[in-house]
Image: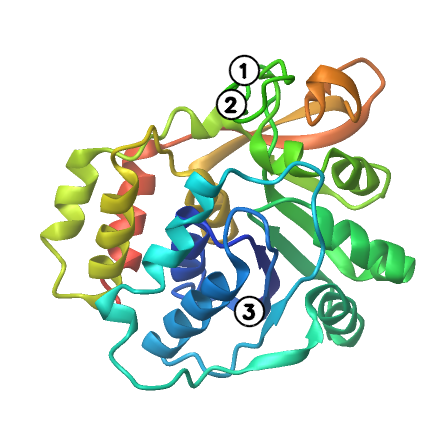
Amino acid sequence: MSKLVLLDHDGAIDDILATLLLMTMANIEVLGIVVTPADCYVNAALNVTRKLLDLMECHHVRVAESTVRGIHPFPALYRRDSLIMDNFPILNQKDAIKTPLVSQIGQQFMVETLQSASQPVTLMVTGPLTTVATALDIDPTIEEKIKEIVWMGGALNVSGNVEKEFAPEHDGSAEWNAYWDAIAVERVWQSNIPLIVCSLDITNTVPVTAEFIRKLAKQRHYQLSDLAGLCYALAIPQDYYCWDVLATSYLDRPDLFSLKEWQTKVITTGSSQGKIKVVEKGRKILAMDAVNKDKFHNYLLKQWSKF
């Protein structure tokens, strides 16, 4: 039986690449995609998501726009990548977008999709947890329909990536998805939903390199490799890592990872907002602890050569 997955992403380069990867997984049934308006300009991110589904001829996958808002907006410098991707030639070969946008707002779409699912659903979240937290507030009974949440977020035993340039009053201990809305992270932490976290502790070990982009370039006759190469080329001037792609690969290849249990709490106030702190007698989570990097990169190259 296929694993049921509902994707919630926030429109950045790595979110789009995570979507690209997810849609190649043979044993995954994607019930829908919610776009949370965090690390993106949401209209552009919705366009890119729907154009990507058009490219892969996955018009049946439903896309919804979340209307939640976070506490600390992502910098415009980060969000503009969604505008650039929306103009990639490979995504604009047709005059109109075929994949529809559903009428429900994303948080309500999440509730309805979970309630109608035939079996418990894995939530794959590559952005902030605000849409999930809002859905839990709308209908707390959906907790029973969530098998697990796989989340790219947090920093457990390493520094965060919230820079002083963009958050002068922050101490740099938090990761951006958690910092965007620490209250939402705490809401999810209060639930009984199993949490599998892909934190900066592991993503810091898997940077995007020029060597990997060159390998993608050698198979650019495949449209997915070409698109992935364009996205990563856009990111290469930055310190960029396989954040969301690494997290999403776990759905299909958990054998590549080792997991470790931690007890944690979420810091929601003060200069450490969004920090997920390791404590005694805290909320238990499983964190991705290590990954076979060579096999992971080979897996990406294989998946992105399918179309």
For the residue pair 200 and 178, the one nearer the viewer reads as 178
Residue that label 2 marks:
201
SS label for mark 2: helix
Residue that label 1 marks:
158
* 187 relative to 164, above or below: below
Does label 2 or label 3 sit earlier along the sequence?
A: 3
User: CB atoms at circles 1 and 3 under 8 Å apart?
Assistant: no
Q: Is residue 138 left or right of residue 49?
A: right
Q: CA distance from mark 1 to mark 3?
A: 33 Å
User: CB atoms at circles 2 and 1 under 8 Å apart?
Assistant: yes
Quarter in which the C terminus is drawn: bottom left
User: CB atoms at circles 2 and 3 under 8 Å apart?
Assistant: no
The spot of residue 281 in percent (x, y) is 85, 18
Q: CA distance from mark 2 to mark 3?
A: 28 Å
For the residue pair 24 and 68, the one nearer the viewer reads as 68
The spot of residue 120 in percent (x, y) is 73, 63
Tell me the kind of residue under disc 1.
Answer: Val
Tell me the kind of residue under disc 3.
Answer: Val
* 84 relative to 113, above or below: above
Judge whether residue 307 can be spotted in this image.
Answer: no
The spot of residue 181 in percent (x, y) is 71, 38
SS label for mark 3: strand
Quarter in which the N terminus is drawn: bottom right
Residue that label 3 marks:
30
